[in-house]
Amino acid sequence: MKTEKGFHCVEFKHEAQMQIYKEIKDMTPEQEIEYFRRRVETGVLGKLWGKLHGESAAEGRHNMTTSSLPHHPHHP
């Protein structure tokens, strides 16, 4: 007997990825970096990240360099 699953993890993941794609598709690499930095700052884990690094999320953002970020596969 197969039961109905109330939460579809893969479907949820695809929907979240599509929403992010729609938001960043026309951005430059620099704009994408800023987009994700803002998401980190305002996201659920932003305060925790700051506490782990002994600073506020905003301070951490200013200390982070673009060279420390991974290369975006769609932008050289």
Image (spheres, rainbow, N blue to C red):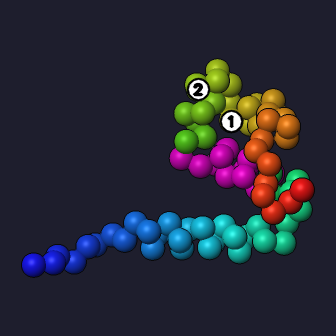
The outermost residue toward the left is: 1
Task: Work out whether residue 19 or residue 38 is closer to the camera in this orientation and state it.
Answer: 19
Callout 2: SS: helix
Where residue 65 appears, x then y in whole percent?
84, 35
Residue type marked 1: Ala
Where residue 76 appears, x then y in whole percent?
89, 56
The residue that label 2 is drawn on is: 51
Magenta extent: 34-44
Q: How many labels were placed on the picture?
A: 2
Horizontal arrangement in the rendering, residue 73 relative to residue 21 (left or right): right
Q: Main secondary structure of the magenta part?
A: helix
Horizontal arrangement in the rendering, residue 34 relative to residue 47 (left or right): right
- The residue located at (76%, 67%) in the rendering is 24
Task: Work out whether residue 73 or residue 63 is closer to the camera in this orientation and state it.
Answer: 73
- The residue located at (33%, 69%) in the rendering is 7
The disc, 1 or 2, on the residue closer to the chain's N-terminal end is: 2
**In the picture shown, does residue 75 fall above or below 55?**
below
**In the picture shown, does residue 39 fall above or below 56?**
below
Query: Residue 28 in magenta?
Result: no
Query: Residue 36 in magenta?
Result: yes
Characterize the local packing of mark 2: few (<14), some (14-19) or many (20 or more) Cα atoms within 10 angstroms: few
Task: Work out whether residue 75 or residue 30 is closer to the camera in this orientation and state it.
Answer: 75
Q: Quadrant of residue 21?
A: bottom right
Question: How far apart in space, not on screen, are marks 1 and 2 (Cα)?
Answer: 8 Å
**In the picture shown, does residue 46 fall above or below 74?**
above
Q: Quadrant of residue 3?
A: bottom left
- The residue located at (50%, 66%) in the rendering is 13
Where residue 59 appears, x then y in whole percent?
76, 31
- The residue located at (85%, 37%) in the rendering is 67
The residue that label 1 is drawn on is: 57
